[in-house]
Image (tube, grey):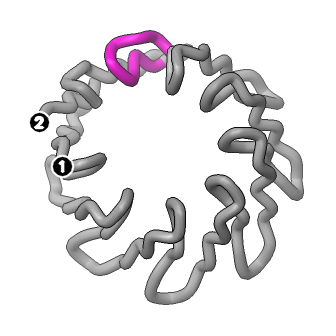
Amino acid sequence: FCGYCVCRTRSQWLIFCGYCLLIFCGYCVCRTKSWLLIFCGYCVCRTRSEWLIFCGYCVCRTRSQWLIFCGYCVCRTRSQWLIFCGYCVCRTRSQWLIFCGYCVCRTRSQWLIFCGYCVCHTFAFFLITV
């Protein structure tokens, strides 16, 4: 994301344009045992049955589906996922069609992800570049 380095430590990630746990709209993502403040300051409450996630919508987990991303239904099947505003994520051995039709190509060393940006995986960090 934006060429910044995601450094992983025990307590934090430097992520999303170099800000430390400042994510999506500048809010701080504080991780505790019971909750995460994530995505525009909304609280993601984890329970056995549900997650409050993405702009206050409730993600209900059942055997067959997830309600996610602004009320859209993510249907899980053997061949595909309906995810991200109704776009279809097709899983194959070599690639994922994800995020508004962009192709995420998986290799041993890197992922092409998020609008064509290359996520390089190393032992210590992810260097995300164009």
Q: What residue do we see at 53% from left, 62% from top?
A: 85
Q: Which mark is residue 130?
A: 2
Q: What residue do we see at 41% from left, 72% from top?
A: 89
Circle 2: residue type: Val
Where's residue 82, x and y in %? 53, 74
- Determine the secondary structure under disc 2: loop
- Determine the secondary structure under disc 1: loop
Closest to the observer: 84 or 90?
A: 84
Where's residue 37, x and y in %? 70, 24
Give the residue at mark 1. Answer: 116
- Cα–Cα gap, marks 1 and 2: 7 Å
Dot 1 alpha-carbon crowd within 10 angstroms: few under 14, some 14 to 19, many 20 or more: some
Circle 1: residue type: Gly
Q: Is residue 54 above or below residue 101?
A: above
Asked if residue 82 lies left or right of residue 114, the reply is right
In magenta, the rendered stretch is: 13-21
Where's residue 45, x and y in %? 82, 37
Q: Earlier in the sequence, mark 1 or mark 2?
A: 1
| Majority secondary structure of magenta residues | loop
Closest to the observer: 118 or 110?
A: 118
Q: What residue do we see at 64% from left, 29% from top?
A: 38
Where's residue 29, x and y in %? 61, 20
* Residue 16 falls in image quadrant: top left
Closest to the observer: 88 or 46?
A: 88
Residues under numbered marks 1 and 2 in contact, where contact means CB atoms less than 8 Å apart: yes
* Residue 65 falls in image quadrant: bottom right
Which residue extends farthest bottom?
A: 78
